[in-house]
Amino acid sequence: MKHTTTHPRRSTSGFTLVEMVLVLGIVALLVGAGIVSLTGVLDSGKKTRVKGDLTTLTSALRSYETDNMFLPTSEQGLSALLEKPTSRPAPQNWTAKLKKNLLDPWGNPYRYRRPGTKDKGGFDVYSSGPDGVADNTDDIGNWDL
């Protein structure tokens, strides 16, 4: 009788290199698409935050006007909401309208102009937008509220 040795059969249930590369390519494509869509959400969130800050600043300016019977000048700017006025007598019960100067989501200070050129309410308070350059098309101001 002839004796033949049989070798155990190799299992073919693993993944080939081509299948692994294909799966990794699909995962990378999905991650890239997720990052692109997340960027749009972050930009939208920043603009929403600016509008909230502008509402706060507008309210603080109106409160300042009620207490002092005048709005701060453009030269005084928004710092007038933090410091007691020195050019005119301040009321006895004067209090700061803000605890600190606000910065927009891009790290720039908010801007104030009186008389306003875009808002008919007497003043403009605005962010210079993502590019940090004032008075161009990406500004977001109290005229947008």
Image (spheres, helix red, strand yellow):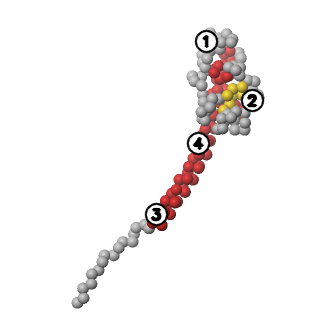
Residue under numbered circle 4: 42
Label located before the other in sequence (2 or 4): 4
Q: Provide the residue designation for mark 3.
A: 20
Q: Which amino acid does label 3 sit on?
A: Met
Under circle 1, the secondary element is: loop
The residue at the point 69 percent across, 26 percent down is 112
Q: Residue at x 33, y 76 (%)?
A: 9
Which comes sooner in the sequence, label 1 or label 3?
3
Q: Residue at coordinates 68% horizontally, 12% vertically from top-left?
A: 87
Residue under pointer 2: 119
Image location of residue 114, percent across then percent down: 73, 23
Q: Quadrant of the image for the N terminus? A: bottom left
Nearest to viewer (mark 1 / mark 4): 4
Q: Is residue 65 above or below residue 11?
A: above
Would you name the residue on which mark 1 appears?
A: 93
Mark 1 or 3: the one toward you: 3
Q: Distance between the residues labelled 1 and 2?
A: 30 Å
**Quarter-of-image position of residue 117:** top right
Q: Distance between the residues labelled 1 and 4?
A: 41 Å
Q: What element carries label 2?
A: loop
Q: Please state which amino acid type lies under the numbered disc 1.
A: Asn
Of callouts 1 and 2, the N-terminal one: 1
Q: How crowded is mark 4: few (under 14 residues within 10 Å), some or many (20 or more)?
A: few
Left or right: 117 in relation to 18: right
Residue drawn where x is 46% and y is 63% of the image: 20
